[in-house]
């Protein structure tokens, strides 16, 4: 029975496809390292790595090794963060009232191009189109005052 092997170029294509998939999806910076594993496996096939089971083990081994050893340092170095903004970063920013908001009442404000529910925590009335400061974020409600 003849042993099964995958051509080196299939591993290279798989590696490049996984790296491209990393760019197109929010995969958490994992597919990139499987792409590295695919490319390095293709190189090792050129150098004589023969059977498919051995190629598969090398691919998995290189990929997991890269994830365990390189992912965290690279994410730190590249400042790779969650692509969404933290709501805690909204505190201190300025919002614009979309309607009249009485003291200790809820109304609507606009900030960063989105409409938010806002609780007027101050003792002054917030008129429409007036700028107000975000004091706190509680769930999806901004606590604001002039």
Image: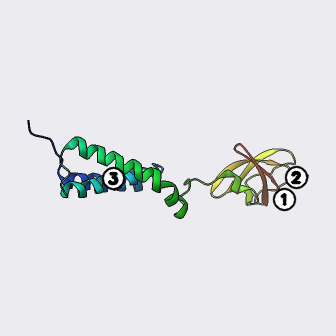
Whether residues under marks 1 and 2 lie with C-beta atoms below 8 angstroms apart, the answer is: yes
Q: State how far apart marks 1 and 3 are (Cα).
A: 55 Å
Residue at mark 3: 37
| Proximity of marks 1 and 3: CB atoms separated by less than 8 Å | no
| Residue closest to the far right | 123
Identify the mark nearer the N-term, 1 or 3. Answer: 3
| Quadrant placement of the C terminus | bottom right
Say which quadrant the N terminus sits in: top left
Q: Which residue does the numbered mark 1 point to in the structure image?
A: 146
Q: Residues within 10 Å of mark 2 (few under 14, many from 20)?
A: some
| Residue at image location 41% in from the left, 56% down from the top | 23
Residue 3, located in which quarter of the rendered image?
top left
User: In the image, what residue occupies the spot 41% across and 53% down?
Assistant: 66
For mark 1, give the secondary structure. Answer: loop
Q: Residue tagged by mark 2?
A: 122
Task: Depth check: give the residue in front, 124 or 18.
Answer: 18
């Amino acid at each position: 029975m003849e042993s099964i092997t995958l051509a080196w170029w299939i591993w290279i294509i798989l590696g490049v496809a996984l790296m491209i998939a990393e760019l197109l999806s929010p995969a958490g910076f994992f597919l990139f390292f499987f792409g590295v594993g695919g490319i390095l496996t293709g190189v090792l096939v050129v150098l004589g790595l023969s059977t498919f089971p051995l190629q598969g083990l090398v691919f998995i081994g290189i990929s997991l090794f890269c994830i365990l050893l390189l992912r965290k340092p690279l994410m730190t170095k590249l400042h790779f963060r969650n692509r969404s903004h933290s709501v805690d970063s909204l505190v201190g920013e300025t919002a614009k009232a979309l309607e009249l908001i009485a003291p200790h009442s809820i109304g609507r404000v606009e900030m960063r191009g989105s409409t938010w529910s806002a609780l007027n925590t101050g003792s002054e009335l917030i008129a429409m189109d007036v700028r107000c400061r975000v004091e706190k974020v509680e769930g999806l409600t901004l606590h604001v005052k002039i």
